[in-house]
Image: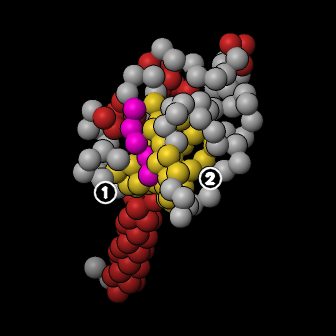
């Protein structure tokens, strides 16, 4: 091999190694930031990983909201019509949060199947529900609070 070809081969090898390292770092960063969506039925069945940050959504069960008097801690149940999970949250809830409405909670599951949420998102108007939550409710045979004509536009 001539010196010019050796030099070119080293540059190509360095370029391939650099691209591989960059791809590995990008994949590692993406893997840490992925929040998969799970329905209450999937969580109750044990399909959701414990200790990993996930998104869970559905309807807040009426009468399930329990607040503490001396702190911002609260707990409530989220259902997809078939199963329910308990969500613990400490903080200020969104203005549009209320019982019987669709929400998405992000947090980690404990060993008892309770979601310790660090973020709660409420729908932004009365005709919207997150697509994942709407699909889960449709599969369970529940449509929640959406008017009948608005269900198709929410997808």
**Depth order, front residue of 78/72:** 72
Where's residue 68, x and y in %?
Answer: 51, 56
Report crowding for label 1: few under 14, some 14 to 19, many 20 or more residues within 10 A (C-alpha).
Answer: few
Report crowding for label 2: few under 14, some 14 to 19, many 20 or more residues within 10 A (C-alpha).
Answer: some
Residue plotted at (53% across, 64% down): 70
Residue plotted at (56% across, 27% down): 134
Above or below, comparing residue 80 to residue 92 in the picture: above
Q: Is residue 5 visible?
A: no
SS at mark 2 in the image: loop
Snapshot colouring? secondary structure
Q: Which residues are magenta?
A: 84-88
Where's residue 58, x and y in %?
Answer: 51, 33
Q: Hey, which quadrant is residue 122 in on the image?
A: top right
Magenta-colored stretch includes residue 127: no
Instruction: Specify which label sits upstream in the sequence, 2 or 1.
Output: 1
Where's residue 105, x and y in %?
Answer: 51, 47
Q: Residue furthest bottom?
A: 3
Q: Which residue is mark 1?
A: 51
Q: Nearer the viewer, mark 2 or mark 1?
A: 2
Q: Is residue 122 visible?
A: yes
The majority secondary structure of the magenta stretch comes to strand
Above or below, comparing residue 59 to residue 1 in the picture: above
**Depth order, front residue of 65/143:** 65
Residue plotted at (50% across, 46% down): 66
Q: Which residue is mark 2?
A: 93
SS at mark 1 in the image: loop
């Amino acid at each position: 091999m001539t010196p010019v070809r050796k030099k070119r081969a080293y540059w190509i090898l360095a370029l391939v190694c650099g691209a591989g390292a960059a791809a590995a770092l990008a994949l590692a960063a993406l893997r840490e930031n992925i929040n998969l969506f799970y329905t209450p039925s999937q969580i109750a069945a044990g399909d959701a990983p414990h200790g990993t940050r996930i998104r869970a959504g559905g309807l807040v069960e009426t009468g399930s909201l329990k607040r503490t008097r001396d702190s911002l801690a609260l707990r409530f149940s989220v259902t997809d019509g078939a199963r329910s999970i308990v969500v613990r949250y400490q903080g200020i809830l969104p203005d549009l949060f209320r019982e019987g409405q669709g929400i998405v909670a992000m947090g980690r599951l404990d060993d008892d199947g309770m979601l310790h949420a660090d973020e709660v998102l409420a729908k932004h108007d009365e005709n919207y529900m997150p697509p994942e939550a709407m699909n889960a409710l449709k599969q369970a045979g529940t449509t929640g609070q959406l008017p009948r004509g608005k269900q198709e536009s929410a997808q």
